[in-house]
Image: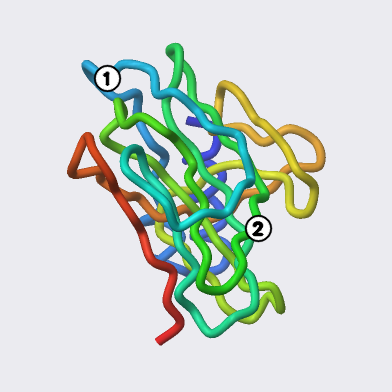
Amino acid sequence: MLLRCLVLGLASIYGGDALAQRSVPTTPENQSSPSPNNTTTQSNDFSSGWRICNKSTYDAAYVIYSYYENSEWVTRGWRRIDRDKCSVFQNEVTNKTVYFYAISDDETYKWSGDTSLCAHPTDEFEYFGDISVCENGYEIHDFRKWEIKSTVANTYNLTSN
C-alpha cells in the first residue's frame, strides 16, 4: 500500500498518468509453491517449467524475476542470458503468474511492464516478503506480468524489434 501511495504521489508531482497506472501484484489465490531452480546454466534442452530465451540482437540480457512461494513474494536477480541461449528459471510450473524485468547488456533496451517491484539495481540478490516497500539499496523496476499457460514447458523470447 505504501508503494501505491508513493507511485500515486509521484504521478501527481510529475503530472504523469502512466505512473498512476502502475500495479502491485496481489497474493495469488489457490496457488501452490513453485520449485525454484537457481542454476545459471544456459541450455536449449527443455521439457518442463519456464524459461526465458535471449533471441534479441544484444550479446546478453540481464533478468530479474518474481513469483509467489510459501505465502510470500520472492524476487531474484540478476541472471545473465547470452544471445541465442535460454535460462530455465523454474523446473516445475505450479504458479500461474510470474513477473520479470530484463535489460540489454549495454542498457539501451528494456523488457518491462507496469507492475512495480523492488530489486537491487546492480548486485545479485534474493528479496523475500513485502514487495511494496523497498529496503535500502533497492529500487523500483517495472516488471512485465507473464501468465503461464502450460504445466509442461513455457518459453518467453526476449526480442529487440
State whether residue 36 appears in this view.
yes
In the figure, is residue 81 to the left or right of 12? right
Q: Does dot 2 land on a helix, a strand or a loop?
A: strand
Residue at 57% across / 62% down in the picture? Answer: 13
Q: Does dot 1 land on a helix, a strand or a loop?
A: loop
Residue at 53% across / 85% down in the picture? Answer: 57
Picture layout, residue 132 above or below residue 160: above
Instruction: Characterize the local packing of mark 2: few (<14), some (14-19) or many (20 or more) Cα atoms within 10 angstroms.
Output: many
Where is residue 32 shown, x and y percent of the image?
A: 31, 16
Colour theme: rainbow
| Amino acid type of the residue tagged 1 in the rendering | Gln
Picture layout, residue 22 above or below residue 153: below
Picture layout, residue 14 above or below residue 28: below
Which circle marks residue 80 in the picture? 2
| Residue 39: quadrant of the picture | top right
Where is residue 26 shown, x and y percent of the image?
A: 35, 29
Question: What residue sits right under mark 1 in the picture?
Answer: 31
| Amino acid type of the residue tagged 2 in the rendering | Arg
